[in-house]
């Protein structure tokens, strides 16, 4: 691939404009008042600048080839931050523990990329793990990477919760939606009468640190049945704003799926968290193997993957999408 062609695919000119825009933001007097947001933006700046620097220093075919993976991130929302939601399947403690393991796996993946991880909401399991949880991962192209991970994940292992040490199969669902920027948010209006909004008190594990005020928010979008929650912000207004962002991301993602023509037709597609619906299997017993059932990529390095080494799975899937071997509109 010629360097000029790579520049167009990587949108180098657009990235340079984004650097200028962020630099202008950073000179604003109030920029550092929101420390979390400021940290997120400065990390994004360093990540974009790193791509530009690698491109400008690329001289040999080998250097250029090393940048070609970045051309896989050409979707409309690929540069965005991402919200990840985890839901345990049937099976009680086993599946709740598995959902918690997945949450930790993606958090470690984010840390390896120097991305920011924020807790949004969490419902703990009775003995271990989680019933459900939502986190936000902030970083340049976070959604571009993570969109490949949406679906049902299957675990096979010798159960640590079974006195007989029997082999168990567990399932958990991972949902991924992009964080929508303000311009798109303003264009995509959600009718308030389509929303059912509940407030409740947020609290930590075991009833600790229970908030005396009902600051946590649960929003149900009645036409689709989509439910989103936010509980970790300090005020009800902040939690509502964040929950609406997650809902907006889910609605837009549904709208752009090619088998969904209009938002009015949405009835909410239920994904069965059970055998036959999995996108990936994690087998820890009687042998060690993780296999993606879409790209057929597999590895025996189970501990590495559970520790956050997921890039090869993501990139193999995205390459198959790019070449049309896997047909998916994301």
Image (cartoon, grey):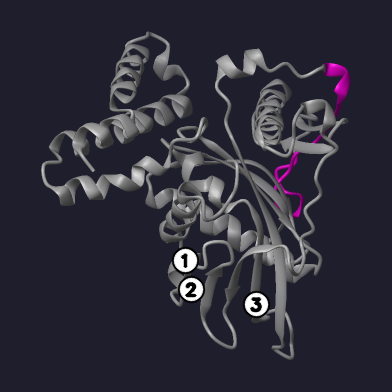
Give the x, y percent position of residue 73: 43, 40
Say which label, 2 or 3, has the lower sequence index. Answer: 3
Side (left or right) of 95 relative to 102: right
Quarter of the image where one finds residue 134: top right
Which class describes the residues within 10 Å of circle 3: few (<14), some (14-19), or many (20+)? many
Closer to the camera in the image, 23 or 150:
150
- Give the Cα separation between the discs numbered 2 and 3: 12 Å
Which class describes the residues within 10 Å of circle 1: few (<14), some (14-19), or many (20+)? many
Closer to the camera in the image, 23 or 53:
53
Give the x, y percent position of residue 79: 45, 33
Q: Which residue shows up at 68% across the image and 66% down it? A: 97
Q: Which residue shows up at 29% across the image and 22% down it? A: 13
| Residue topped by disc 1 | 305
Q: Against 248, is 3 above or below?
A: below
Q: Is residue 142 magenta?
A: no
Find the magenta span and give its range.
192-210
| Residue topped by disc 2 | 302
Query: Does dot 2 land on a helix, a strand or a loop?
Result: helix
Res. 23 visible in picture: yes
Residue at the farthest front position? 324
| Residue topped by disc 3 | 156
Quadrant where the N terminus sits is top left
Q: Are marks 2 and 1 in contact (CB under 8 Å)?
A: yes
Quadrant where the C terminus sits is top right
- Give the Cα separation between the discs numbered 2 and 1: 5 Å
Q: Are marks 2 and 3 in contact (CB under 8 Å)?
A: no
Side (left or right) of 102 relative to 35: right
- Give the Cα separation between the discs numbered 1 and 3: 15 Å
Quarter of the image where one finds residue 182: top right
């Amino acid at each position: 691939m010629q360097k000029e062609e790579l520049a167009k695919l990587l949108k180098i000119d657009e990235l340079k404009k984004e650097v200028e825009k962020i630099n202008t933001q950073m000179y604003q007097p109030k920029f550092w008042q929101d420390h979390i947001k400021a940290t997120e933006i400065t990390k994004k700046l360093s990540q974009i600048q790193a791509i530009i620097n690698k491109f400008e220093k690329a001289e040999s075919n080998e250097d250029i080839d090393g940048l070609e993976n970045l051309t896989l991130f050409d979707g409309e929302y690929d540069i965005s931050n991402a919200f990840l939601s985890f839901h345990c399947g049937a099976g009680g403690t086993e599946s709740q523990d598995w959902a918690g393991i997945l949450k930790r796996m993606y958090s470690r993946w984010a840390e390896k990329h120097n991305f920011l991880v924020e807790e949004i909401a969490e419902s703990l399991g009775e003995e271990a793990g989680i019933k459900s949880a939502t986190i936000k991962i902030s970083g340049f192209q976070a959604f571009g990477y993570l969109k490949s991970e949406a679906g049902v994940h299957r675990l096979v292992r010798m159960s640590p919760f079974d006195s007989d040490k029997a082999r168990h199969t567990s399932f958990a669902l991972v949902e991924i939606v992009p964080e929508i920027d303000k311009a798109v948010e303003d264009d995509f209006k959600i009718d308030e009468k389509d929303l059912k909004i509940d407030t409740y008190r947020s609290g930590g594990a075991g009833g600790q640190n229970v908030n005396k005020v009902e600051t946590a928010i649960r929003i149900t979008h009645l036409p689709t049945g989509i439910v989103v929650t936010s509980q970790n912000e300090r005020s009800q207004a902040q939690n509502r704003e964040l929950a609406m962002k997650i809902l907006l991301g889910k609605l837009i993602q549904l709208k752009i799926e090619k088998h969904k023509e209009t938002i009015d037709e949405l009835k909410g597609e239920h994904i069965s968290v059970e055998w036959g619906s999995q996108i990936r299997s994690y087998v820890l017993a009687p042998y060690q193997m993780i296999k993606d059932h879409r790209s057929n990529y597999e590895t025996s390095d189970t501990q590495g993957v559970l520790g956050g080494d997921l890039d090869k799975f993501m990139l193999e899937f995205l390459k198959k999408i790019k070449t049309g071997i896997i047909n998916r509109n994301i």
